[in-house]
Amino acid sequence: MKSYYVRTFGCQMNKHDSERIAGLLETSGYVASHAIETADVVVFNTCCVRETADERLYGQVSSLKAIKTGGRPDVLIAVGGCVGQRDGEAVRKQVPHVDVVFGTHNIHELPALLDAARSGRAAISVLPEGTSFASDLPSARVDRWHGWVSITVGCDNHCTYCIVPTVRGPERSRPLDDIVSEVEHLVADGVVEVTLLGQNVNSYGRDIYGSPRFSELLHAVAATGIARIRFATSHPKDISPATIEALATLPAVMPFLHLPVQHGSNSILRAMNRRYTREQYLERIRDIRASVPGIALSTDIIVGFPGETDEDFEQTLDLVRTVAFDHAFTFIYSPREGTPAARLTKTVPRDVAQERFDRLATLVRDLSYASNQREVGMVRPVLVEGSSRRDLATLSARTPHNRLVHIPLPEGVRALDLAGRLLAARIVVAHPWFLSGELTEDAC
Ligand code: 5AD
Ligand code: SF4
């Protein structure tokens, strides 16, 4: 039997797609390999949202050449995902030892492309747009207790810095019944948490039903009996009062919202084509906090967008301080060829962007630490994810607010056996990026 290994770069959608790639390969007779060096087929599921992920991919694919020239010429290397979609044939020009290239719309073709490559036929296929959903393919889940469920693919927003609409295509929603039936199957299979995925979940359904139906979808998914529901990503201009109400009233919908603001200055928000102002964003946050007291908020922020002045950047710092996010992902702007912003000429010098980035990162760390400190002494229901990556004697678990808690593994128990269990934990120490806790006798 041939073995496979999938290396994933980038976002949660890619993690979802990688589980489908694995599921598809397993139904085609491949078995999972635990090491890239011993696999017969290596699949790179790629990301091109920022330059760093792009460069890392080409570095890693190049370094695999040694496996082929070092005695295993039959190993097949496949590049799929966003770089495959964007570069197609050109992937092979950069790294000729790649055997298969596929895109974001044709994951289902991978087994046939591997067969073609093995028999020396052309194995590059990228479709301009999608007709099927990767979610309809079989899945080999990484965690038996968690399911990624895609509800939309693509994006219609065209933020000027973003390559996603180019590589993932226009927004398409999956029928509500298909999603609910997938979650029902997951529940029957022992899954306790699902993450509903889309570039802009709040506009879910607009293309097939004429108006967004995300809040309805949340209600329908909650009715399956799943214990925890998370979702990403929300666009501030589209999050509706009905969705906020679902967050407030459905116990299974976790009290956590990732709401990317991207910038704090109105002129940069306009240049980014975000279609809201800082005032509107802050008003949304006020509404959400009024309806869901104590909700945890995270965001994405870009520093160094073309034309960003010191004043603009101060506006970002001010907004971050005003909201006091519990967490934020911060990025230095990287121009992506083919996006409107890549043509802008008033670029911010690298050292200036780096200095701003460092200031923002310090603020984000301080806010995250302060938010974690407020948790000390609380007893929270935590979902055990498994052992911590650094220490097998420590459990990793998540609170409803998505905070990571490290808990000493009780004696005589395996972390693996506790994965997927909901337990009660008392928070004892706060750290900037995680909490330390202990299991309590309390029921959760
Ligand atoms: N440069 C920097 N960050 C970017 N993002 C998307 N495109 C770019 C880019 N060209 C960030 C945004 C988005 C997150 C997933 O990546 O903040 O929300
Ligand atoms: Fe990119 Fe904007 Fe769509 Fe998010 S909403 S994927 S940032 S275009």
Image: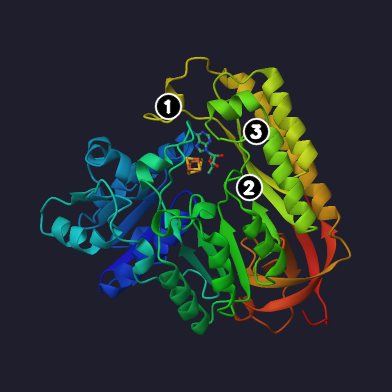
Which of label 2 and label 3 is nearer to you?
3
- Cβ atoms under marks 1 and 3 closer than 8 Å: no
Neighbor class of circle 3 (other Cα within 10 Å; few <14, some 14-19, many 20+) is many
Q: Residue at x 52, y 31 (%)?
A: 273
Q: Position of residue 81 (x, y in %)?
A: 35, 50
Q: Amino acid at mark 1?
A: Pro
Disc 2: which residue: 259
Cβ at disc 1 under 8 Å from ligand 2:
no
Q: Position of residue 193 (x, y in %)?
A: 58, 71
Quadrant into which the N terminus falls: bottom left
Which of label 1 and label 3 is nearer to you?
3
Q: Left or right? Give the position of 205 relative to 316.
A: left
Disc 3: which residue: 277
Name the residue furthest front.
210
Cα separation between marks 2 and 3: 14 Å
Neighbor class of circle 1 (other Cα within 10 Å; few <14, some 14-19, many 20+) is some
| In the foreground, 284 or 22 | 284
In the rendered view, tell whether residue 180 sits above or below residue 92: below
Say whether residue 35 is visible. Answer: no
Local SS, label 1: helix
Q: Position of residue 306 (x, y in %)?
A: 54, 21
Q: Amino acid at mark 3?
A: Thr
In the rendered view, tell whether residue 95 sits above or below residue 119: above
Local SS, label 3: loop
- Cβ atoms under marks 1 and 2 closer than 8 Å: no
Disc 1: which residue: 340
